[in-house]
Amino acid sequence: VQLVESGGGLVQPGGSLRLSCAASGSIASFNAMGWYRQAPGKQRELVAVTTRGGSTNYGNSVKGQFSISRDNAKNTVYLQMNSLKPEDTAVYYCSAGRNYPYGMDYWGKGTLVTVSS
């Protein structure tokens, strides 16, 4: 399965972006689809995960600010990001897992989000 992210770019503080992750195969076969991010000089961290059962899990730093959703018919996962802050600047990676929470199996190449005035 290939995962391709899109929607990143430069946005001013307080702005919004929606990231998309298109999978080459059926995402319904994965028990979880997620977004992670890695800022310069920092470790990769969880942003949001959605499971096949419909539950969601968010990183503490984005709760109430970001929202993850999935469209199984389109094999696409979305990340709506609101009220963006400079500290949200990072490369955002899409991921898919068959054995979540014991790790994710597939990763996209990432899309850069830069929050700056």
Image: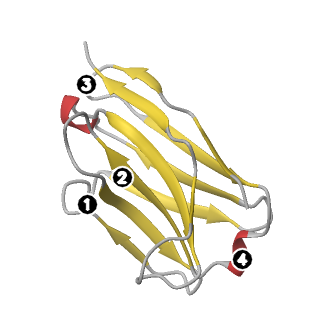
In front: mark 2 or mark 4?
4
Say if 94 sits above or below 27 in the image: above
Give amino acid for label 2. Answer: Phe
Q: Secondary structure at mark 3?
A: loop
| Residue corresponding to mark 4 | 28
Q: Earlier in the sequence, mark 3 or mark 1?
A: 3
In front: mark 4 or mark 1?
4
Numbered mark located on residue 63 in the image: 1
Residue 85 place in picture, x, y as percent: 22, 33
Q: Quadrant of residue 61?
A: bottom left
Question: Badge 4 local density, few (<14 within 10 Å), some, or many (20+)?
Answer: some
| Residue corresponding to mark 3 | 13
The structure residue drawn at horizontal position 44% and vertical position 68%, both measured from the top left corner, is 49
Residue 81 place in picture, x, y as percent: 39, 43
Numbered mark located on residue 66 in the image: 2
Q: Earlier in the sequence, mark 3 or mark 4?
A: 3
Q: Nearer the viewer, residue 24 or 61?
A: 24
Q: CA distance from mark 2 to mark 4?
A: 22 Å
